[in-house]
Amino acid sequence: MRESILQASLPLFVEKGFIYTEMQDIAEAAGISVQELKTCFARTDDVFMELIRSMDHQKFDSMGEYEQQSGSSWEKIVKFLKLAEHQMEIVNENSLLPAVFEFNLVSWRTGRNLDFIQSRYDLGTNEICQFFKKGVDSGEFEPQLPLETIVGFVGSQVNGLILAVQLIGKEKIDFKGQMEALLVALENMLKPHKR
């Protein structure tokens, strides 16, 4: 039942956002009563966090697939960022991203769910650090800064670009140029030895 609730809630969060989606909406979309919904999820926040957790696992699984591909660590990072670029490029009105930003801002404002946000940040940072560390361990990278700093920088840049694409539009912010600048900066920070 949890999975069907999550599937039913996704279009609601996309259409109405996090702020305006209520338990009643989710229950109706899932074809169950609010009481039944509350046996699985106590609050709208809990439904949303589980949905995000599920999507994060899919994202990290795809990152693992990139790690398994042949090629240098640098080539894998470039491929992964190109995929991220493509995904950001197709962000449109059918995206969950505005709801994620609402959730983060509401959580910050209210002080709720901050542990979830922190653990999500930590998990993402750790996954990407491990990805970069393989290049260091193989002698391919000579990082000019601590890996955690580089990963934090990349995450901040990508999150900022996602928000700018949503709010302003990819053409106005020179999205492709900024993604290229991110790759140049990352190359300068990691100093990959080209093979």
Image: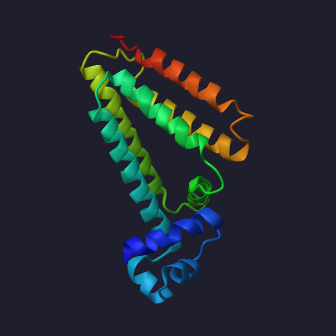
Q: Position of residue 195 (x, y in %)?
A: 32, 10
Q: Quadrant of the N terminus?
A: bottom left
The answer to whether residue 94 is left or right of residue 126 is: right
The answer to whether residue 189 is left or right of residue 101 is: left
Task: Please identify the residue farthest to the left as the structure is shown.
Answer: 138
Q: Can residue 37 be seen in the rendering of this structure?
A: yes
Q: Where is 144 relative to 158, above or below? A: above
Colour pattern of the rendering? rainbow
Q: Residue at x 40, y 39 (%)?
A: 125
Q: Residue at x 46, y 18 (%)?
A: 187
Q: Nearer the viewer, residue 161 or 189?
A: 161
Q: Residue at x 67, y 47 (%)?
A: 166
Q: Where is 190 relative to 84, above or below? A: above
Q: Position of residue 116 (x, y in %)?
A: 43, 57
Q: Position of residue 10 (x, y in %)?
A: 52, 66
Q: Can residue 119 be seen in the rendering of this structure?
A: no
